[in-house]
Image (cartoon, rainbow, N blue to C red):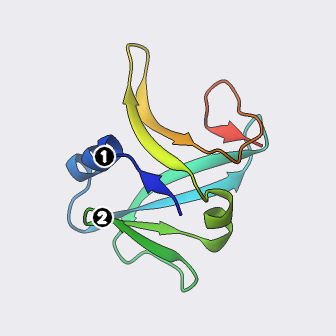
Amino acid sequence: MIVFSPTAINRLKNTLDAAESVRVAVVGGGCAGVSYTMNIVPVNDNDEEDMLLEFDHIKVYIDPHSATILEETTIDYVETLQSQGFVFNNPKSNATCGCGMSFS
């Protein structure tokens, strides 16, 4: 199962309204083979097979294929002098690109 850090949950709580949820997925592409995606979607915007996870009242949808790849992944929110955003810490990835959003 994926996990969101407390910092990531707080960021989502300050970003989403009551009618919004989050969709996390892995899609083909990127310089290392596949990429992480995280989008804001309406609360009931899910397919029948999607898993529904809930973190402090934040609904997160994930398709079964992505759930397998993202198992044991922690999603954090990081702010540095150079950038800010959500970071996927996936112990199953073999290699990542420089931006950290693409992996193999």
Q: Amino acid at mark 2?
A: Glu
Residue 6's disc is: 1
Identify the secondary structure beneath mark 2: strand
Q: Who's the residue at 58% across and 83% down the image?
A: 49
**Picture quadrant of residue 91:** top right
Q: Indicate the position of residue 92 as horizontal and vertical percent values.
A: 70, 48
Q: Amino acid at mark 1?
A: Pro
Residue 20's disc is: 2
Identify the secondary structure beneath mark 1: helix
Q: Who's the residue at 51% across and 58% down the image?
A: 2
91 or 58, nearer to the observer = 91
Image quarter in which the C terminus is found? top right
Q: Residues within 10 Å of mark 1 (few under 14, many from 20)?
A: some
Q: Residues within 10 Å of mark 2 (few under 14, many from 20)?
A: some
Q: Indicate the position of residue 15 as horizontal and vertical percent values.
A: 25, 48
Vertical order, 30 against 27 (above or below)? above
Q: Indicate the position of residue 77 as horizontal and vertical percent values.
A: 39, 37
Q: Who's the residue at 44% across and 74% down the image?
A: 52
34 or 72, nearer to the observer = 72
Mark 2 or mark 1: which comes first in sequence? 1
From the viewer's perspective, is 45 left or right of 97? left
